[in-house]
Image: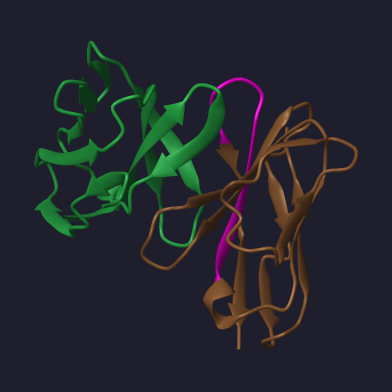
Chain colours: A green, B brown
Amino acid sequence: RKEVEQDPGPFNVPEGATVAFNCTYSNSASQSFFWYRQDCRKEPKLLMSVYSSGNEDGRFTAQLNRASQYISLLIRDSKLSDSATYLCVVNLDTGRRALTFGSGTRLQVQP
Amino acid sequence: GAGVSQSPRYKVAKRGQDVALRCDPISGHVSLFWYQQALGQGPEFLTYFQNEAQLDKSGLPSDRFFAERPEGSVSTLKIQRTQQEDSAVYLCASSLLNEQFFGPGTRLTVL
């Protein structure tokens, strides 16, 4: 079983739609959680950190459920420019700084 | 300021050849990471440096992989006797505090 699991998609949605991605992680000792965005043939870039209380950044809302070991990302009012792969990322231990990535969920926003 | 740079951007090697991949981190960033990203997968951790010290090399897949950062800035990932399964994008990331900033990667193809 992979340490971080995501639905690979693709999610094909029209402009203006709301779309949600989910992710589960296996290690209950995980400390930090992130969503990264990766465009085709580009490097991953941090989209947002995920906090236990949930957090919002414009059209993007991230939620963390530690009891269920579940992370979500909600994108409202999708734009064409949101088309990318969204990577769920976990840091397993504060002493070990390596990030553990899911395989990513591909989003295609269509006009 | 410049971001993380990597060279070469593309490398084609014949099976059995040695390759060296270079990473120039963001100036002043203490931490440096190497990740391997296979097609359709998320990046997987290889190794981590804090300044010149290699603190974690648990992700290196075999003893054919070797990384160094002798002066605490530029790092080189060396792969000896390349195999076809080494074909991937090799990403370097640097960080000062928590956020990791990724370079564009080196796409290695082993024929």
Residue toward you, B103 or B108: B108
Q: What is the x, y in percent for residue B70? A: 89, 42
Residue farthest top in this picture = A53
Q: Is residue B53 magenta?
A: no
Q: Is residue A27 above or below residue B15?
A: above
Residue farthest right in this picture = B71
Query: Residue at 70% across / 67% down in the picture?
Result: B64
Q: What is the x, y in percent for residue A98? A: 53, 37
Q: Which residues are magenta?
A: B88-100
Q: What is the x, y in percent for residue A47? A: 39, 33
Q: Is residue A77 above or below residue A54?
A: below
Q: What is the x, y in percent for residue A92? A: 42, 31
Q: Is residue B93 magenta?
A: yes
Q: How many marks?
A: 0
Give the left or right position of residue B44, taking residue A80 as reference: right
Query: Residue at 73% across / 40% down in the picture?
Result: B25
> Which quarter of the rendered picture does the N terminus of chain B lie within?
top right
Q: Is residue A33 above or below residue A51?
A: below
Residue toward you, B42 or B46: B46
Secondary structure of the magenta portion, mostly? Answer: strand
Quarter where residue A55 is shown: top left
The answer to whether residue B40 is seen in the rendering is yes
> Which quarter of the rendered picture does the C terminus of chain B lie within?
bottom right
Query: Residue at 68% across / 75% down in the picture?
Result: B11
Give the left or right position of residue B20, taking residue A3 as reference: right
Quarter where residue B63 is shown: bottom right
The answer to whether residue B103 is seen in the rendering is no
Query: Residue at 58% across / 72% down in the picture?
Result: B86
